[in-house]
Image: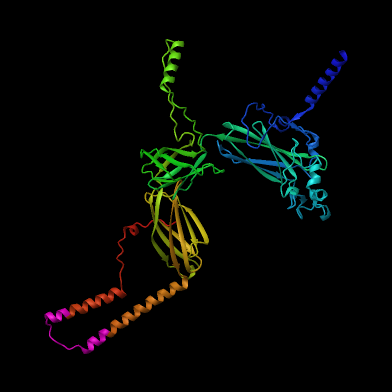
Amino acid sequence: MSRVCHHLGFLLLAEAVLCTAAIWFQDVLNQERTSPVTSYKKLHGWSSDQNEWNEKLYPFWEEGDPRWKDCWKGGKVTAKLVTDSPALVGSNVTFVVTLQFPKCQREDNDGNIIYERNCTQDTPALQDQYVYNWTKWINSCGWENCTRNQSHNVFPDGRPFPHHPDWKRRNFVYLFHTFGQYYQKTGRFSTTVSVNTANITLGKHVMEVSIYRRGHSTHVPIARASSIYVVTDKIPLFVNMSQKNDRNISDSIFIKDSPITFDVKIHDPSSYLNNSVISYKWDFGDGSGLFVSSSSITLHTYALQGNFSLNLTVQAIIPVPCKPVTPTPPLPTSAELVLSLTIELSSNPDSSTTVKTTEDNPDEGCHIYRYGYYRTNISIVEGILEVNIIQMTNIQMTESQAENSLVDFVVTCQGSLPTDVCTVVSDPTCQMSQSVVCDPIPITDKCLLTIRRAFDEPGTYCINITLGDDTSQALASALISVNGGSSSGATEGIFIFLGLLAVFVIIVAFVLYKRYKQYKPIERSPGRAENQEGFNAYFSNFKAIFFSTSNEKDPLLKSKPGIV
């Protein structure tokens, strides 16, 4: 009896030692050393981290272990893990992990790691171009032989690798861990995994990934990474606000009497809401009331200056599979009902009967409602609403000053007073900019100024004049034809020639009149008076054409603005 007890104690001790020596997925993959998850809902395709880990095939090294320094030739490999979180509960959240190799190393088309040619002077020679030539030794064994070799094509939990068509190029093993579960897959230098969030609790969670490379006898750990992701029951969204003359779209300051475009962007990378009915309820905070729209883009114009609170509520009606209808039991017969009441009353004479009815709602279980909210404060100011070019004048110069042609632009604007002006000179199509000149504007009591600009060569130009202040800006454009100095001289010569010709015609007409005129007493008759008045009118028109005088009465030019 004592001998049997002795053997039994030895077996129990051996089992305890084996249990103590075993390593679990939770021990290896829980990088953050958070409390283990004891209660969770299973993720589709994932496994519990309470499974045993094959440390012989996949060694586990703690942080600071000196073996990390020799896990990769030529330097250290890092892993970058990114996510498209936040995710609306029920949608998919996606993670992308990318390996970043040491300098001058990259993965080729066959999945091998090679040195980049001509990267640095220290790059190895062509015969040593491979960092890891996995193709060379994988080709020595086909899929069947490599599968039977337990040191290759097997995950840490003993499951075989899936037989992908490009399995020879997948030389890295990725082990993802979250919510007390793990997911394992093979891949190249970058891979992606998506998780449905229907069974994940709301809040912040950590996704961890450990990466191993293929080795001759075992797989070798090369990098780890982690990323925080968020699961929420509120629709993730943001709003882009823009306005035609707004100078800075990020300062939340906009212009009065000019429409603002509100563009709602819902963050739904997995297209979970594609078949949903979405509505947008706006409260612009200016007393204009609530506005409900089915479009994600809305325009609104503020008629008053001041600070306003903007509120948006987005509602999504999401179709889901309907719950099975529970069949209604048949109504009892009169005899059964009487018998039941008799038994109940006899067992409890003081009890009163209560009738409960349940009505099935056809919409319940077929749709769920999710909401998203956006709130912000905006400021409305007067701003510059419009710019107009009311006059363009060529400045005449002497021959010594005729290197450049000068043009004066008289500009007015509506709204607030500008503080700066910029002029952009482009080709006639207004596509290719040739010069940009910006100047401050002296403080005045009205928006009226003259802008003088020089042009190096004659030709046709597109002119864009922009007036701006701290919060707004407005633009006016025009096409202008600029003549050079020689053209100006030719124009003056033409006018001189026309003037001399007019004087010559007048003299000839006067001589002919004196020569053929007959003396007659001064007598005024109606016919003669009419002829005389006609000749005088003709002569007056002739003078008006060739000797015109300036009758400019524009009040803008009486008080000509300063030249900028």
Residue 275 screen position, x and y as percent: 50, 44
In-image side of 129 versus 466 (left or right): right
Q: Residue furthest right?
A: 3
Q: Quadrant of the N terminus?
A: top right
Residue 137 screen position, x and y as percent: 82, 48
In-image side of 371 versus 191 (left or right): left
Query: What is the quadrant of residue 4 in the picture?
Result: top right
Q: Which of the two residues, 57 or 238, is positioned nearer the viewer here?
A: 57
Q: How many marks?
A: 0
Residue at 37% of width from left, 77% of height from top? 496
In-image side of 193 versus 415 (left or right): right
Q: Which of the two residues, 422 or 329, is positioned nearer the viewer here?
A: 329
Any magenta on residue 346? no
Query: What is the quadrant of residue 546 in the picture?
Result: bottom left
Residue at 44% of width from left, 40% of height from top? 378
Q: Quadrant of the C terminus?
A: bottom left
Residue 314 screen position, x and y as percent: 46, 39
How is the model colour-coded? rainbow
Q: Is residue 132 visible?
A: no
Q: Which of the two residues, 219 or 266, is positioned nearer the viewer here?
A: 219
Instruction: Determine whether 347 is above or below 58 in the image.
Output: above
In-image side of 527 versus 91 (left or right): left
Q: Which of the two residues, 497 or 136, is positioned nearer the viewer here?
A: 136
Any magenta on residue 521? yes
Q: Is residue 528 visible?
A: yes
Please state the extent of the stretch shown in magenta in the rendering: 509-530
Residue 85 screen position, x and y as percent: 58, 39
Residue at 33% of width from left, 58% of height from top? 558
Instruction: Determine whether 54 is above or below 394 in the image.
Output: above
